[in-house]
Amino acid sequence: MYKFIFNNLLFEKTTVTIQGLENPASILQCEPKDFESKKLEACTKLANFIINTYNNSLRSRVVTEIIRRSQFHYLLAILKGYEILQIYCNLSQERKREITVKS
């Protein structure tokens, strides 16, 4: 069993273990016929771990981007509402003949 410790999106420490992965030093002490099979098995497990970790990282970045864009749309809606409120407030004001909204 091999453990990897890293921080997730919330900066919490996460430990991931790969079952059946032995210490590299113990593989070196195996017989030559077992060495190749254990080496291949370890490389396959590590490659799968790397691919899964990359996919999870990519997925979390996509989710973060979707949330960011959603929040931006809310801010745009607030801005649009504020602009419309300004128009309605300016309509009800009485001004002298020469004074405009732009002046």
Image (tube, rainbow, N blue to C red):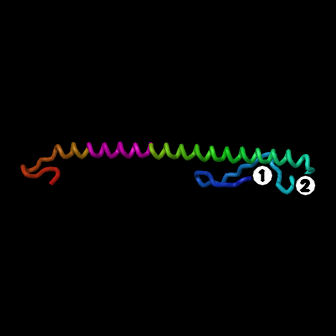
| Residue topped by disc 1 | 2
- Which residue sits furthest right? 31
The magenta stretch is: 70-84
Q: Tell me the quarter of the picture where residue 13 sits.
A: bottom right
Kindly identify which residue carries mark 2: 29
- The location of residue 81, given as percent across then percent down, is 31, 43
**Element type at marker 2?**
loop
Element under label 1? strand
What is the three-letter code of the residue carrying label 1? Tyr
Query: What's under tag 2, amino acid-wise?
Result: Gln
In primary-sequence order, the first of circles 2 and 1 is: 1
Q: Residue furthest left?
A: 97
Relative image position of residue 7 (x, y in whole percent): 63, 54
**Residue at (41, 46) in percent of width and height:** 72
State the CA–CA distance, disc 2 to disc 1. Answer: 18 Å
Count neighbours of disc 2 (C-alpha within 10 A) and say few if under 14, some if 14 to 19, many if 20 or more. Answer: few
Residue plotted at (33% across, 46% down): 79
Residue at (22%, 44%) from the top-left corner? 87
Residue at 70% x, 55% y: name it: 5
Return the residue nearer the eye: 91 or 101.
101
Which corner quadrant holds the C terminus?
Answer: bottom left
82 displayed left or right of 93: right
- Asked if residue 25 is among those painted magenta in the image, a careful observer would answer no
Q: Position of residue 83 (x, y in %)?
A: 27, 45
Within 10 Å of disc 1 (Cα), the crowding (few <14, some 14-19, many 20+) is few
- Point out which mark residue 85 bears: none
